[in-house]
Image (tube, coloured by chain):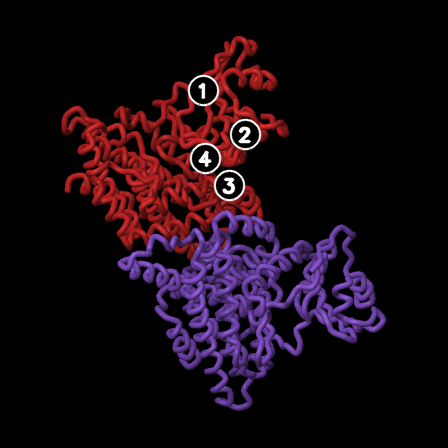
Chain colours: A purple, B red
Amino acid sequence: MNTTTARAYRAHAPETLGAALAELPAVAARLGGTVDDWRVREVGDGNINLVFIVEGPRGSVVAKQALPYVRLVGESWPLPLARASFEHAALVEQARHAPARVPEVHHFDESQALVVMEHLTPHLILRKGLIAGTVYPKLAEHVAELLAETLFKTSDLHLAAADKKQKMKFFCDNTALCKITEDLIFTDPYRDAELNRHTSPQLDALALQFRRDTPLKRAAQELKRRFLGDAQALIHGDLHTGSLMVTESDTRAIDPEFAFYGPMGFDIGAVLGNLLLAYYAQDGHEERPGARDDYREWILAQITAIWEGFEARFRALWAEAGTGDGFVAGLFDEAADAPAAAAAKDRYLRALLADSLRFGGMKMIRRILGLAHVEDLESIEDPDRRAAAERRALALARELVLFGEGVASIHEVAPAARFHRLR
Amino acid sequence: MNTTTARAYRAHAPETLGAALAELPAVAARLGGTVDDWRVREVGDGNINLVFIVEGPRGSVVAKQALPYVRLVGESWPLPLARASFEHAALVEQARHAPARVPEVHHFDESQALVVMEHLTPHLILRKGLIAGTVYPKLAEHVAELLAETLFKTSDLHLAAADKKQKMKFFCDNTALCKITEDLIFTDPYRDAELNRHTSPQLDALALQFRRDTPLKRAAQELKRRFLGDAQALIHGDLHTGSLMVTESDTRAIDPEFAFYGPMGFDIGAVLGNLLLAYYAQDGHEERPGARDDYREWILAQITAIWEGFEARFRALWAEAGTGDGFVAGLFDEAADAPAAAAAKDRYLRALLADSLRFGGMKMIRRILGLAHVEDLESIEDPDRRAAAERRALALARELVLFGEGVASIHEVAPAARFHRLR
């Protein structure tokens, strides 16, 4: 992997990208042939970047280039190009801990805000698979691996304090993207923000009630302060089901441009919350009532399995690689200390489950009442049907945000999800 | 204030410092006369720095210079000179918010790790005043002002997230001094560390019991993780009663070289914990039993008054200057939202009280079982009397660390302190 810098930024088009990549011997060799043999397509369906697939005779790559503004909105909403540097740094860090769970980086050009990386194929965005009703047998195992490895290995449980502070320092500059999260997730759904939207008129009264829901607003701001100040680990920062690319046998996390040192539960909650949205959306996608019953239950089983897999791997890492300053294992090395060490770990994971459920609930609410919605629900064409699914999701989400600390085990989540679907 | 850089570091002696200060017009003018008229004394009684008082015909200054090693131990324990930069930056930041509560900085020379500042006179170190039994009528009010202003104004309650992250980023490098705290406060008292010492043989069994106290060790590591990762505000980091200089009418905090973005309760707890040590130490200083009864109660009253003054000022700041990203007041501006906004603030302050008591307990324990002790207790010559005071302090400290979250009000602390003295 090479890093180049120092030319003036210009946004690429399919016509200009090939020539730029031809200057990179490693990338050119990977593609094979010469620039004339390459097919370049712009495929960005996200909100804020250009994404190109480049295919050559030998192989293919993805080139992702940041634009200096939010693509969805236009030049009136500027966004720093430096986010590509944070995405690149996060991809490199994640690859150190979970190399099989992220795309390989082939090249980074800071001046062009351009990351050239592995073309994941025939991978599909998980969210689309969940809408289609596709089962991914390795999903839970892989997501658990991704979460446990990346979160544990960048936390104080694994790192010396000085090493962690150095990593954290770099990401202190990724404030523009954090600000988007702060506003769109923790604040806007709870006020009459211009960019909010919801299924109307069906959810008008409920949306208004959320803006008047005083305990929920209090809790949202508490969680926001955790997001702002709790530097627990390097988190992906946007780990919804649209940031996971899957096949039957593989799972990768992409797009960590929101990465920074924050609370672990924000990443875990993003996955769980988006799976719960997919669960409630099934009612809008099944051909006849009950046709997706098995799939619905498969989704709930993934929630349980992801947490259980995460917890098991996290505990294993703590036992093997718990060398950080955040837990001095040597304090607990007498036989009589074993129960206390176990209690310390149990308390840590219990608190992390509560965080994950609370942040997960926040992520669900913003996808129904805030600016950015999810295709799981948006693709339900009948607004009454969509609103019905959204109401159920909001009911569970509110419960998770307010009472997540009272959930004793991940096994309590599936029954709660079923209850709110049927009540 | 000027800032100079770029000459090779050399440790000053009284003979060399005058010539160096003579090159600084603002400092020279403050002293008056010329270098031949100045009296320079090295007065550092701390553990890790050189401190000079320079007196001229017109005025006097203090010059504090970091040494590249821990003075108490010698060159075998190196310590980065950069700590002077963190002390300087912290003094400047604190002066923006509580100018009357810190010494004025006259000059900073980064290459020499030298801060020239206001000579506080006739101020005395608070700890010495507490040992002597001196009442300071303005102490609680001033400490409350210092804590509320510096902590609130550097927190997410006041700052925009991006501004706070920029400040925090700078202090991410102050890891060497944080490491001292991590080891000496959160870890060493709970293991058989070489540098530990305690009143022996009187406390031998109790010290051993602390190293076997499994819930306490678990709690100590939880609090350590908060210290490592909870970037709540710019904290002084070493705010014991030896870092407060007082007269009957003035109070100043000095020596913030341990400053970084950490949990507010660590600073508040440092003050409260050290006052509690002073409380228990009175038994060793009174001429006849009961002679210090009034003074003992005065100390307890200060603990209550400091918290109450802090809380009142912190709430006032939240109302006036709560413009940060950590609490969007606009979410609570309908009349019906008022109870929720009040609940949010009550919960914040309740959690902060618990943090303060828990960290305060940690600070008490390290001063009795760890490396660095306090003169309040060390100056009790009779080891049995000293050990008796230390046992009482340890009993309260353990209770605060383990059960601080169960303390509903600051008014519960004085009764607990009295109970553990008399039981």
Question: Label 1 sits on what residue type?
Answer: Glu
Name the residue beneath numbered marker 2.
B113
Q: Does label 2 or label 1 sit earlier along the sequence?
A: 1
Distance of mark 4 from mark 3, alpha carbons? Answer: 20 Å
Q: Do the residues under discs 1 and 3 have CB atoms within 8 angstroms?
A: no
Do pointers 2 and 1 mark residues of a single chain?
A: yes
Q: Secondary structure at mark 3?
A: loop
Q: How many marks?
A: 4
- Badge 4 vs badge 3, beta-carbon distance below 8 Å: no
x and y percentages locating residue B395 in the rendered image: 23, 44
Q: Is residue A332 above or below residue B97?
A: below
Mark 2 or mark 4, which has the lower sequence index?
A: 4
Q: Which residue is mark 4?
A: B76
From what the image shows, is residue A172 above or below residue A275?
A: above
Which circle, 4 or 3, is nearer the viewer? 4
The mark nearer the N terminus, 1 or 4, is: 1
The answer to whether A389 appears left or right of B407 in the picture is right
Q: Which residue is mark 1?
A: B42
Residue A123 lies, in percent from the top left, at: 63, 77
> Which residue in the structure is indicated by mark 3?
B174
Query: Are labels 1 and 3 assigned to the same chain?
Result: yes
Q: Is residue B398 left or right of residue B150?
A: left
* Residue A236 visible: yes
Q: What crowding class fits label 1: few (fewer than 14 Cα within 10 Å), some (14-19), or many (20 or more)?
A: some
Q: CA distance from mark 1 to mark 3?
A: 26 Å
Relative to A31, is B225 on the left or the right? left
Do the CB atoms of the residues marked 2 and 4 lie less than 8 Å apart?
no
Crowding near the residue tagged with mark 2, few <14, some 14–19, many ≥20 C-alpha atoms within 10 Å: many
Verify CB contact (< 8 Å) between mark 3 and mark 2. Answer: no
Which of these two is toward me, A263 or B185? B185
Q: Name the N-terminal-most of marks 3 and 2.
A: 2
Question: Chain letter of disc 3?
Answer: B
